[in-house]
Image (spheres, rainbow, N blue to C red):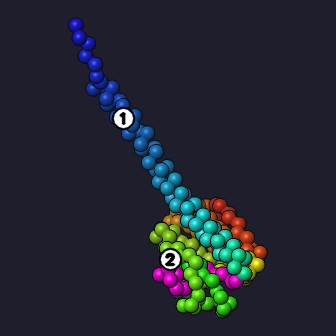
Amino acid sequence: MKKNSGFTLLELVLTVTMISVVMAIAIPSMSTFNQNDRLVTNINTIIGHLAYARSEAVKRSQQVSICVSNDAATCTGGNNWEDGWIIYIDADGSNTFDASEEVLRAQQALNTSQTLTPTTFASQVTYDYRGFATSTGSFQLCDNRSGPYGKTISISNTGRVRLQDGSAC
């Protein structure tokens, strides 16, 4: 006699029910994980660009600036850092971008649900030939959640960058 193999209806229903319960628990936490991951990715991009600008200022012995740019080619001014920015060599030391100055890097806009708010800097961060920041301040990166989910970057007068997690948004 041949034995039949397979699942009974009861076994199938129980398996589908258990998978449904696990998915109901996992999906909301996955959404939070994705939001946190986007914040970490963008804050690391900002820190990387600040470090790059500082190192280029020292390497080239020239003033290097980062300014708000929504077209990745010119400084557009304003406080909307989430629109993007460019890093350029301020060869004449005028603290303004001229068409003759070299753009080293450009960053496109951040995720639309995130805001990058400066506390002191308006539309530009500048490093001198020693790697010192010409002004101090901080940026706060938040998404559409409220509470202690934000991240803050502080720039000291020596040009060093410090990251603080858990800032209130």
Is most of the magenta stretch helix, strand or loop? loop
- Secondary structure of the residue carrying tag 2 is helix
Looking at the image, residue 89 sits to the left or right of residue 26; the answer is: right
Q: How many marks?
A: 2
On screen, residue 128 above or below 13: below
Residue 67 rendering spot, x and y as whole percentages: 59, 82
- Which residue is drawn at the image coordinates 72% and 81% (left, top)? 61
Q: Which residues are magenta?
A: 62-75
Q: Nearer the viewer, residue 61 or 150?
A: 61
Residue 39 belongs to magenta span? no
The alpha-carbon separation of the residues under discs 1 and 2 comes to 45 Å
Q: Which numbered disc covers residue 83?
A: 2
Q: Position of residue 41 (x, y in %)?
A: 55, 61
Q: Residues within 10 Å of mark 2 (few under 14, many from 20)?
A: many
- Where in the figure is residue 70, as x and y percent of width and height? 49, 80
Q: Quadrant of the C terminus?
A: bottom right
- Furthest residue to the top? 1
Q: Nearer the viewer, mark 1 or mark 2?
A: 2
Instruction: Inspect this view and state whether residue 65 appears.
Output: yes
The image quadrant that residue 153 belongs to is bottom right
Query: Which of the 4 image quadrants contains residue 140?
Result: bottom right
**Which numbered disc, 1 or 2, marks the residue that appears first in the sequence?**
1
Name the spot of residue 23 as percent of width and height, x first. Answer: 41, 42
Query: Which residue reaches farthest left?
Result: 1
Q: Secondary structure at mark 1?
A: helix
Label 1: few (<14), some (14–19) or many (≥20) C-alpha neighbours in 10 Å:
few
* Residue 136 appears in the figure: no
**Amino acid type, label 2:** Asp
For the N terminus, which image quadrant?
Answer: top left
Report the residue at 71% width, 66% height from top.
162
Q: Which residue has dot 1 on it?
A: 17
Q: Give the amino acid at mark 1.
A: Thr
